[in-house]
Every structure is written in structure tokens, then in C-alpha cells.
Amino acid sequence: MKILITGGAGFIGSNLCEYFLKNAHNIVCFDNFSTGKVENITNFLLQYPNTFELQVGDIRNISDCRKAVEGVDVVLHEAALGSVPRSIKDPITTNEVNISGFLNMLVSSCDAKIKRFIYAASSSTYGNSEILPKEEDVIGKPLSPYAVTKYVNELYADVFSKTYGVECIGLRYFNVFGRRQDPFGAYAAVIPLFIKNFINHESPVINGDGQYSRDFTFIDNVIQMNMLAINTDNQKALNQIYNTACGEKTTLNQLVVYLKELLCQYDSEIEKIEILHGKERAGDIPHSLASIEKAKKLLGYIPKQNIYDGLKESIDWYWKNLK
């Protein structure tokens, strides 16, 4: 199969590239390197010269999108401008990338007669809904520009599946973490940021009292969901949205306990590092916990690793790559 992975040089995209290359697929990586990194894919260019292709381009440019989808069987659309705080600071660029870019990819895929379009949706779509666990059909109002853009993606995908016959599957990612996730920069996610802090003997800063909770999801579970979405022949599974998570709730305070426990196996001094607390962050939802029953029923999804096992693997990777 020839698979186009947009944002293929990013954290999730590069992990998807690696998995499908190892499983003998041809991969087209499409990225503009605004957040993706060349080092994430350098080894693929060397190891898979005949089955890995890099196309540098921008999803905001429809001619780049049309070129990227040529001869492709399936699209995994991972390219987006993430981060709630970044979207609050710059909603215009977030909208251009996440909505206009998404529509460009949908139109290009439709015109190229792509069989299936699988895209990264987001748990931010649940917005101010307080219902736990989060079920796909019950959402609230978005709390950030980023959340708005990801919800609009779902609406466009639904319209295109009904109007143009494109098989669309949306995967609502819940706080994904793992190898290659960038710990640097103003918009670094909490897990790689805290791991970096601890390794450098710096105090991590928790926004709020630490009782906010998330359904942290290891990258291998995300890979599994994309693989299942590509391979399913269950017609009822198509043109659906799926929570992509573990179905476990972890507070930030508990996360810190896990991180300290695992990192102390490498450096016992980390146990002494103080935890700081700051203000709650605008646009953040208090609690996030996914129901994964729909994915289990229609796709046969069973999470491979829980948060603790995922953190163990992640810390091993960061220890080797940050030291």
C-alpha cells in the first residue's frame, strides 16, 4: 500500500512512518517543517531509499496537496498546528493550517479518488462537557480556537463522506506521548517537558493544583488505531469518529509521582526536586477520560500499553537522547 502521511516529520507522524515502513508499505512524508524535524526522518531516508519519499510542502497550498496525493492509496492526515495556548495567541494561523489546510487535503484526496482519509481529531472537541467518560456522540462547546478548528475538521469530513463518497475516519487523540515528542519550546506537552525538567534537575511547574486529569495515551496505541482504521473492512466502522486513548484517568499530581519513581531508577537525586504550581491555563478542560468502547466494538481496538508502561519506555528514550 502507498500511504501519504501529512506532518510525517512530526512526533506522531514520524512514528507512523516508522511503523508502516517496517511493515513493508510505501510511504510519502509530506511536511513543511514548521513543527516537524528533519532528524525525525533522517534514518528513514537512509534505511528505506526505495519505499520512503519526502515531499516538502505546505497543506495551505493546494497545489502542494495535489502533488502529495498522486498515486496514493490512503491518507493519514496528521499535519496540524497544535497547542491550545498557541491557538489563543495566534488564532488566525491556527485556523489557516487546521481548517483551510484540512479542506485542501480533503479536496485533493477526493479529486485523486483516494480510497480512505484518516485524520487526527482531538479530545479538545469535547470542550466544556463535564460528562465522564467522554463518549463520541456527546460533546460540549469548544474552549479554544484550536478546539474549534478540530471540530470543524470533523464536520467537513462528515460532509465529504456523505457528499463525495470519501471514506473518512477521525481519531480523537487524547494527550498522546512517547518517543520523539519535542520537550523544548513554549508549547511543549507536559510529559516531555516534565521529563526534561527532571533530567536537568529543574522544578516542573504544574498549572493549577495538580488535580486536573488526563487520559494520557502512549504513541503505540495511536499507531494501533491508525493501523486498524486503514485495514478495517467493516462498513459500519467507516465515516465514524473514535476516541483514541487508554480509558484511564491520571491527575497531574499522580503523573509527577510516576515520573519521579521511574526517573529515580536512572538518577536518585530526582526524588528531591521540588514541584512548583502556577496559575490554571486558559482554555484547559479540567478532566479528560475517554470511553473506548466504540473503538473496541467497531475496530477491535485493545490498548497495548497503559500510562505507566508507556512512561517507562518514553523515559528510556529521553534518557538516551537528552543526556
Image (cartoon, rainbow, N blue to C red):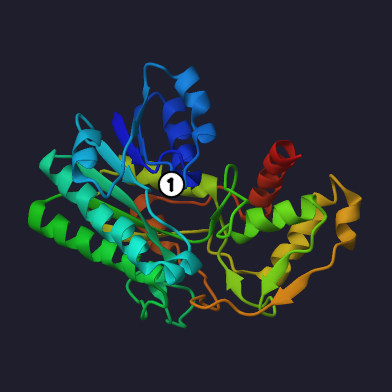
Left or right: residue 72 compared with residue 243: left
The residue identified by callout 1 is 34
Which residue is situated farthest in the left direction here? 163
Q: Is residue 78 above or below residue 320?
A: below
Q: Nearer the viewer, residue 176 or 29?
A: 29
Query: What percent of the width, then of the height, locates residue 154?
Result: 27, 63
Query: What percent of the width, then of the height, locates residue 243?
Result: 41, 61
Q: Locate the C terminus by quadrant.
A: top right
Which residue is situated farthest in the top direction here? 50
Query: What percent of the width, then of the height, locates residue 307?
Result: 63, 56
Left or right: residue 232 compared with residue 217: left
Q: Is residue 28 above or below residue 297?
A: above
Q: Is residue 73 visible?
A: no
Q: Locate the N terminus by quadrant.
A: top left
Q: Nearer the viewer, residue 242 or 17?
A: 17
Which residue is found at the position 48% from the left and 74% from the top?
133
Left or right: residue 51 compared with residue 68: right
Which residue is found at the position 32% from the left and 56% from the top?
97
Which residue is found at the position 67% from the left and 51% from the top?
311
Disc 1 residue type (three-letter): Ser
Which residue is found at the position 31% from the left and 36% from the top?
4
Specify few, some or many for label 1: CA neighbours under 10 Å numbering under 14, 14-19, or 20 or more.
few
Quarter of the view holding residue 163:
bottom left
Left or right: residue 64 compared with residue 276: left
Q: Nearer the viewer, residue 203 or 306?
A: 203
Query: What percent of the width, then of the height, locates residue 264?
Result: 85, 51
Q: Is residue 4 visible?
A: yes
Q: Is residue 320 above or below residue 23?
A: below
The local secondary structure at tag 1 comes to loop
